Amino acid sequence: MMQSSYGMNSNYDEEDDPFAPNPFRAQPAPQQQQQQQQQQQQQPYNNMQQQPQQLYNMQQQQPYGMQQPPPPQGNVQYLSGTMDQNAAPHNYNNQTPASSFFSFAGCLNCIRLDTYQIYFDVDTSDVAGRLKAALLFFHLPDYFRVDTLGDDRNVVVTSETSDTDNNQETPILRKGPDLYGPLWIACTLVFTLAVTSNMLLYFDHWKQFTTNQHHHSSTTTNTTNPSSAAGDFQAMEYDLTHLIHALSVVATFAFGLPTFFWLATICMGMTKVPWVMWICCYGYCLVPYVAITSLLWMPWWSLMQWILLMLATLMSGCFVLRNLANPLLQQDAGKAATFVLAFPVTHFIFMCVLKFSFYTSTKK
Amino acid sequence: MAQSSGAAPEWATAANNAGYNSSGILATTVEQHQDELFAPYSTLDEPVMETIMRDVRAVGAKLKVVMRPMDRAPIFYAAVDTADSNANANPDHIEEMSENDRLIMQQLKDWDLWGPLVLCLALGICLSFRAPSEQASLVFAAVFCGVWVGGTIVTINAQLLGSTISFFQSLCVLGYSIFPMVLVAAVMVIIRWAWIDLIMVAVGYLWSTRTSTFFISQYIKPERRLLALYPVYFFFTFLAWIVFYF
């Protein structure tokens, strides 16, 4: 086997069937799940000192949520992806973790690829459905979290339309939060920000160039690309710094802020929303921003830019508020009020940062 | 880089390049051939030029593979294969590929990283040559890091989505696929007219995405093919934007 020893991932063997069955759709192990349930019920909710570690251990074994086991119904399928209560993330291909060093603390599992693979168990149709829900149903309370991602539901959700001939309800699988969407929506937003803000610079250069021509009526080169040395230099300087600024701003907002909120809620005792759900909601809330920034490449008036950005912030903030406020308020209404207030405020700050960093022309 | 093709004698590599395999050959027979070719062979006594030229020829062969047209357009391949996979389970996709495509895939499996390194350096040098002297090093660093980090992220994404792709093999294919962009960047050192630039970059982009799309879509399920291909398109769009704008 010439290829099997190459590459970092010796788990993947190209000589085998490339479409091996997903181990997270394997037969469940009911005993493990019941033990975890007992552990969860025995530990009191307000035991704050042990709570973070307990939660982390449980998140290792039960990757998403701490829900009840699925009731045995007739047409139920085993849940897949992150909703599979009985999946053990370390048993990929029936292998235990490779070295004892990794199993020493459990914290080092965050740099292993296997721990994140369960959050990428989505199909194209799933991601398309989530994008549609983020754009169209942002105002419905808990729609994205419950109906699209499948939070709080342990059974398969039946579809509204019956496409088969019999009258049985056809089950649809809800796969839980994913990390594919947040990652690539954030990357798309970074790229769109960099490209559109540079186009604005280009238009500024062009306008200046044409106004200079009118004033001086000189016979310089008549090309429309910024080939003059000074314009080229400035454009390039702004190009790269805009890309790097966009990367840092979007990374902070899409990954740093939800992680900060997650830590804060954990420390305050509201443990219902796991880290992946925070990242997923904040990732899919960037979709209106992507849509709006791809319109901002034209040289609108400044007021129009504000209006468009305000529209995106409204959609995005509403989305985050509707989906994340309810589970927090259910757990602790007093402390959760701080977060419910923080969501729109942080969105507004993000909008101002976008406007003043990328869509403001500094020369006149 | 003896591990990639160093053990094979020169005549065997030339035979592969010439397309010696007859039509209708199955993958198992090809493997048997390769087992024979990779029999122990001492390279200690050969002249240094021979050692260097072996890797140069391997790089050249893969560059030709990347530029060679496919029999079936990969965009249509992604759409057509869904129906085929639903009809009959065919995980190896052997009889769906034409002979030409199978040869291409077989050659791309023999990965090496010299080619991507040389191409990445060439792209960085071309772009920093066009930049003002204060920005040259920044542009070069951005291109270099962008290519390698971007390739890594695309590969890891494909692996996380459940494909059985090998990390370095995928990195190799992505690195070789930027060869059309390198050609476009080299031409743009001389020609800087806006509309011609745009057309050249568009053609280079389409050509670059062709091989890597075809390669990556082999290893991933049809339901997730677009999820794994979107980062590939994104990566080449990013490169195309840098080549065009800088």
Image: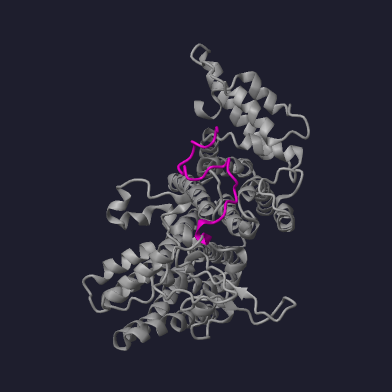
Figure coloring: one colour
The residue lying at 64 percent from left, 55 percent from top is A223
Please state which of residues A2 and A180 is positioned toward the viewer in this rendering: A2
Report if residue A2 lies within the magenta region: yes
Point out residue A272 in the picture as x, y percentages from the top left corner: 37, 77
Point out residue B103 in the picture as x, y percentages from the top left corner: 70, 35
The residue lying at 51 percent from left, 45 percent from top is A12
Q: Is residue B5 visible?
A: yes
Please state which of residues A216 and A142 is positioned toward the viewer in this rendering: A142
Q: Quadrant of residue B64?
A: top right
Q: Quadrant of residue A29?
A: bottom left
Q: Is residue B189 visible?
A: no
Q: Report how many numbered discs are placed on residues in the image.
A: 0
The residue lying at 78 percent from left, 33 percent from top is B23
- On screen, residue A170 versus residue A108, left or right, reads right
Please state which of residues A300 and B207 is positioned toward the viewer in this rendering: B207
Please state which of residues B23 and A47 is positioned toward the viewer in this rendering: A47
Report if residue A173 lies within the magenta region: no
Point out residue B16 in the picture as x, y percentages from the top left corner: 68, 27
Tell me: residue A73, above or below residue A194: below
User: In the rendered structure, which segment of residues is drawn in magenta?
Assistant: A1-26
Point out residue A275 in the picture as x, y percentages from the top left corner: 38, 69
Tell me: residue B152, above or below residue A79: above
Residue that protrudes farthest toward the right in the picture? B23
